[in-house]
Image (cartoon, coloured by chain):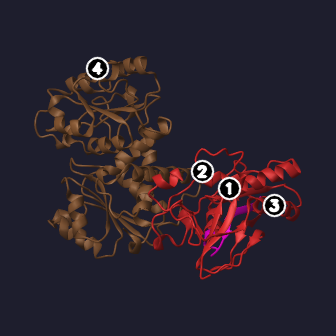
């Protein structure tokens, strides 16, 4: 919140994946995933990733800022708990690869951190919060080619809200959420959205997915 | 934020400066990759229009544009039609008739970039206008200092030494560093102080001094111990009169000599960053010992130059005209 106030740039988000401020906090929003739902969805996704990959060998989890990064870290923590193996986690900022920069105000750029092991010949799981048009993922795939050549790239998202512009689908989905394109999906996570000064350990109740707007 | 031009450091508030420096941090990582290419400015055209000589500013703007996939062209005063007598206005109008998106301009006349911004539709970046400003240099100096001094310039004390009267680097740096919370002391012989600096320093809150040793070594100077020292080039090409008796005398009083470096290290520690915007007059304002000292960040400044200029081009050009505020 402090960062949003200070920063003159549009937070790196995309229409329909709203980054909310207190001022526009939706009053009519309905909760579609509670913190418990988020917790269970991430556990299931972690298990699906392991099942599909037959273990954690060669896995690299790469989060797309801002909310994909904490989600990737949480998945890695769950995998570590289940398999006893620490899977490398990275961050991939895709701003410079977007094809919609011209139609939007200047976006803030986040960090790109690739684990020292790299991505060559590994199975990269891209992690994001909401899958909508698919343009972020297209940009991420392009950004990834500049970094290396993974053996395979998979996609894990907390919410798939439909309305794809591109032939892109997620391999692991927390919740399929049929939406109208006039609605807005708000994802809140403890790591990125907890109120200032809140105890991070006791803040799991912040996790939430809500929908607002639309014609209803 | 959508800014069209970068004409003066005074245009940027603290938040905007920090946004550019943060973007530059990400761009610096790109510089370390084997494939230094981003598709961000694909299809954009950036023209470097340099009526004064330059090595690092021009090449770093060119690299910045190329690494972001913009098409970049260099035009220099000497090789262009200005040497046949074409006016600046006709030259920029001609170039902009070729539908360019951005002009990076260096010119010997102060205020020329402001003037050009009123003549054409392209984004204008001031890469040095006379003795007025050099905003991208101030941003890369701030970037280098922020990196070297642990992330923040709040309360840090930067000493800027040298030919202030002719220095656009000093003018831009005072503004940018102050906005980032740094305290600035400027040191020069009286003949190389710009006129009216007394009122200006009082208004903008920086200190002035005629005594380099006192500023660097004494604890009684107004801003206390320095955290970084920036040496400025003695701009002989802009000097028409006798600003100092001999080069030897200038060097003794205001140069970072080997001896002065030793006292500085003894008093402030051997990790105090030494900056110089380049090109250096070795043996005049800076000794070879100081230029090549372990705490010299002069080459870091050059390296930061590309990243910062990528960030500047990103902030000016990436978002579309239609949403420009």
Residue beneath disc 1: A206
Image location of residue A62, percent across then percent down: 70, 57
Residue beneath disc 4: B214
- Name the chief secondary structure element in magenta: strand
Residue beneath disc 2: A195
Secondary structure at badge 4 equals: helix
Report the residue that reaches farthest toward the bottom: A215
Q: Quadrant of the C terminus of chain B?
A: bottom left
Secondary structure at badge 2 equals: loop
For the residues bearing labels 4 and 3, Cβ distance under 8 angstroms = no
Left or right of residue B37, residue B8 in this image: left
Label 4 or label 2, whichever lies nearer to me, is 2
Label 4 lies in what chain?
B
The colour with which the image depicts chain A is: red
The colour with which the image depicts chain B is: brown
Q: Are marks 1 and 4 on the same chain?
A: no
Instruction: Report which quarter residue B48 is drawn in.
Output: bottom left
- Determine crowd level at label 3: few under 14, some 14-19, many 20+ residues with C-alpha closer than 10 A: few
* Distance in Å between CA atoms under marks 4 and 2: 48 Å
For the residues bearing labels 1 and 2, Cβ distance under 8 angstroms = yes
Q: Which residues are magenta?
A: A122-136
- Which residue is at a point 71% across and 54% down the rendered structure image? A205
* Residue A40: mark in rendering: 3
- Which residue is at a point 44% across and 44% down the rendered structure image? B143
Label 1 or label 4, whichever lies nearer to me, is 1
**Relative depth, front residue between B156 and B260:** B156
């Amino acid at each position: 919140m402090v960062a949003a106030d200070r920063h003159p740039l549009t937070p790196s988000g995309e229409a329909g994946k709203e980054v909310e401020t207190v001022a526009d906090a939706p009053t009519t929003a309905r909760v579609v995933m509670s913190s418990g739902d988020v917790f269970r969805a991430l556990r299931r996704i972690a298990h699906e990733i392991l099942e599909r990959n037959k273990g954690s060998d060669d896995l690299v989890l790469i989060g797309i800022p801002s909310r994909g990064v904490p989600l990737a870290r949480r998945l890695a923590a769950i995998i570590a708990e289940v398999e006893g193996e620490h899977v490398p986690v990275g961050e991939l900022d895709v701003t410079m690869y977007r094809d919609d920069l011209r139609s939007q105000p200047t976006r803030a750029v986040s960090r790109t951190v690739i684990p020292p092991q790299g991505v060559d010949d590994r199975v990269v799981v891209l992690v994001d919060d909401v899958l909508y048009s698919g343009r972020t993922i297209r940009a991420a795939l392009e950004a990834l080619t500049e970094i290396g050549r993974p053996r395979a790239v998979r996609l894990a998202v907390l919410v798939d809200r439909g309305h794809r512009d591109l032939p892109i689908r997620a391999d692991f989905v927390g919740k399929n959420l049929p939406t109208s394109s006039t609605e807005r999906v708000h994802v809140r996570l403890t790591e990125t959205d907890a109120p200032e000064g809140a105890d991070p350990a006791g803040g799991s109740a912040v996790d939430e997915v809500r929908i607002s707007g639309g014609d209803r | 934020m959508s800014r069209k031009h970068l004409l003066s450091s005074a245009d940027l508030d603290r938040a905007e400066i920090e946004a550019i420096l943060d973007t530059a941090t990400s761009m610096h990582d790109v510089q370390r990759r084997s494939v230094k290419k981003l598709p961000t400015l694909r299809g954009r055209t950036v023209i470097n229009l340099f009526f004064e000589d330059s090595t690092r500013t021009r090449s770093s703007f060119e690299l910045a544009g190329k690494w972001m996939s913009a098409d970049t062209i260099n035009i220099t005063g000497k090789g262009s039609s200005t040497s046949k007598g074409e006016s600046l206005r006709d030259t920029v109008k001609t170039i902009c008739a070729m539908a360019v998106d951005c002009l990076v301009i260096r010119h010997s006349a102060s205020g020329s970039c402001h003037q050009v911004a009123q003549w054409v539709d392209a984004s204008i970046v001031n890469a040095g206008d006379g003795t007025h400003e050099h905003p991208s240099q101030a941003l890369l100096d701030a970037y280098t200092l922020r990196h070297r001094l642990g992330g923040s310039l709040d309360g840090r004390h930067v000493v800027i030494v040298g030919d202030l009267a002719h220095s656009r680097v000093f003018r831009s740096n005072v503004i940018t560093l102050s906005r980032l919370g740094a305290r600035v002391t400027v040191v020069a012989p009286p003949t190389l102080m710009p006129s009216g600096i007394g009122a200006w320093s009082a208004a903008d809150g920086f200190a002035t001094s005629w005594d380099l040793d006192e500023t660097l070594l004494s604890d009684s100077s107004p801003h206390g111990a320095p955290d970084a020292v920036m040496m400025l080039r003695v701009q002989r090409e802009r000097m028409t009169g006798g600003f100092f008796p001999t080069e030897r005398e200038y060097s003794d009083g205001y140069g970072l000599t080997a001896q002065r470096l030793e006292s500085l290290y003894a008093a402030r520690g051997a990790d105090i960053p030494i900056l110089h915007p380049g090109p250096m007059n070795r043996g005049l304002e800076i000794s070879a010992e100081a230029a090549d000292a372990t705490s010299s960040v002069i080459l870091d400044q050059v390296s930061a130059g590309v990243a910062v200029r990528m960030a500047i081009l990103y902030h000016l050009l990436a978002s579309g005209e239609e949403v420009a505020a």
